[in-house]
Image (cartoon, rainbow, N blue to C red):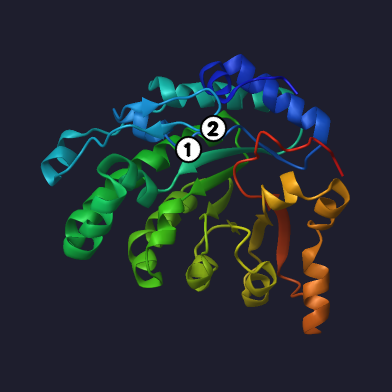
Amino acid sequence: MTKTTVLQALTDGNAHFETVCALVEKFKPDAIFYIMDLTVEAEALGAKINFSTNQSPSVAGHIISSEQDLKNLSIPDPTKADECRFFLKVMEKMKKTLRIPKAAYVIGPLTLAGEIIGVKNLMKILIRSAAFGQKLLEFTTQVSRGYARVLVEAGADIVCLLEPTAVLVSPKHFSQFSKPYVEEIAQSLRAVTVLHICGNTTPLIPEMITTRVHGISIDSVVDLVGVLSQLKNGMAVIGNIDPMKAMVFDPPKRSGRKFYPCAAGWQARRRPLRPSATKIFQKECPVKKLTIPISY
């Protein structure tokens, strides 16, 4: 719609804001996120980032390998770090202009730990040196919490905590090394909070739905109806539209029907939807370049 590349959107605040506004104007959503960048907090800590024209940025190298390296790091001030200030300014513009709920992304503590020390190294640490792992997660929690707070102050009504690395751990390790730290951030915010984990999180669902956030976001490989059937606490479940099959390859009429899978599922199981179960349909990330822009 605006012909803005990923690189332009993530380096030019005006282009980013104009793209967000164009999405709102075209599709009339109930709420709007700014464009995701999972490397913001790692870059603020000093990590080098790979940028490309139409691909999401990625961390080029890890910045710590030991407890001493961790001690040498300091918590960045998100109001002064250029990477964070970029999104703070975008959110401030969104607050002034848009009359729908505004949503922000913040990296989860476990995922940020993986970004700065390496995911393979992190998995080894969690198994072999839990004490170091906890110190690392306490640090990354402080980083993400500080950034989340200023985003809320800038105008964010919703904060989505992105924790994709959690899909690699067991339910036991999730409850020890992700859940309490996510909760610490969520409970500190005066905003709606959502926990997002990519991939097949079916084994983690019992832990995810008892995490103290307002909603969880799931991937297309997870049984949405099955998740809703487990809810007892009024939590919202967000997902699980496939960005390739439903949004790119399926004809528009068929992809439109993808947004109503629960009715048939619940009818087949012959049981009423729990009054506490709220479902919000959303595609996985990201929307592919080939997606046809049709509103329903």
Q: Are marks 1 and 2 in contact (CB under 8 Å)?
A: yes
| Three-letter amino acid code at the position of disc 2 | Glu
The C terminus, quarter of image: top right
Q: How far is disc 1 from disc 2 in space, using C-alphas?
A: 6 Å
**Which residue position is annotated with label 1?**
149
Above/below status of 117 relative to 257 = above
Q: Secondary structure at mark 2?
A: helix
Query: Quadrant of the rendered structure where residue 16 is?
Result: top right
The image quarter in which residue 146 lies? top left
**Residue 274 spot, x, y in % from top left:** 74, 75
Q: Amino acid at mark 1?
A: Arg
11 sits left or right of 101 in the view: left
Give the quadrant of the N terminus. Answer: top right
Q: Secondary structure at mark 1?
A: helix
Label 1 packing within 10 angstroms: few (<14), some (14-19), many (20+): some
Residue at image mark 2: 153
In the rendered structure, the answer to whether residue 251 lies left or right of residue 13 reads right
Tell me the residue at 16%/34% (across/down): 72
The picture quadrant where one finds residue 25 is top right
Percent position of residue 175, x then y: 38, 67
Q: Where in the figure is residue 269, as x and y percent of width and height?
A: 77, 83
Specify few, some or many for label 2: CA neighbours under 10 Å numbering under 14, 14-19, or 20 or more. Answer: some
Residue furthest toward the bottom?
270
Residue 190 in view of the camera: no
Q: Residue at x 67, y 71 (%)?
A: 228
